[in-house]
Image (cartoon, grey):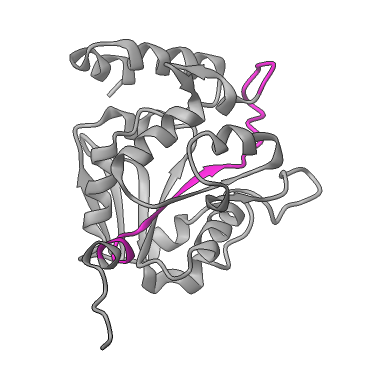
Amino acid sequence: MKSQPNQQEHRMKAVPVVIVLAAGAGTRFAGQSHKLAQSFGHSTVLGTTLAQVVASHLPAVVVTTRALREVAHGWVAAQDVIEVPEAGPGSPQLGMGYSIAAGVRARGDAPGWLVLPGDMPLVKASTLRAVAAALQHHPVAYAQHFGRRGHPVAFSGELFSELATLTGDEGARRIVARYPAAAVEVQDPGVLMDLDTQADLHRLRQAHDAPPAAVQQVSGS
């Protein structure tokens, strides 16, 4: 007699995968080490981002370079870390679009994907779940805070072919513009706060340590 599929396994197959982008060179950050490896809270910038992903209970892959692979290994299993070459002037095909495609191809059987930059450590687990839920009814969904578009941006499985062939640094903006997109309004200023410079790191640390009521002001929303 054929056994019935486990209900929990079925639910896991029905949820989208979070693709954490952690392969950028971070050239605007004037620090001795990569911006994602900077200390943040009780971990690093990337570690704090991944902690929220883990807390969301959504499956995830981290697309990163050899230099940051060990930072990612502290939070996800080895098979969930996708290593890509480091982008440079002589490799125009590399960049955000290339990383998204690598993550999508690695989990091509998923019903959808949430794209989350690794330098956004304040995005809440509840935000990830809310955007994931919107994919049940829309081909594209994204988080927004007080009407301002942020991350993550999510794509349904029907867009696999377009996502899997992305290259360069443009990301998926053209795909977002081509399909009806659902804006998921969240009480989460972190969806607007990324890290490019030392000043950004200082601002993110302030917001991380501030009472919830004060985060709004720090985020500049």
Question: What is the chief secondary structure element of the magenta stretch?
Answer: loop
| Residue 25 magenta | yes
Q: Residue furthest front?
A: 1
> Which residue occupies the extreme bottom position in the image?
1
Give the quarter of the figure containing the C terminus: top left
Magenta stretch bounds = 11-33
Residue 159 placement: quadrant: bottom left
Would residue 202 appear left or right of 148 to someone viewing this image?
right
User: Which image quadrant: the N terminus?
Assistant: bottom left
63 sits to left or right of 5: right
Q: Position of residue 127 (x, y in %)?
A: 26, 41
Nearest the eye: 204 or 19: 19
Image location (x, y in percent) of residue 151: 37, 42
Residue 93, position in %: x, y?
A: 70, 56
Above or below residue 80? Residue 202 is: above
Q: What residue is shown at x 21% (from left), y 17% (from top)? A: 212
Q: Residue at x 62, y 22 (%)?
A: 29
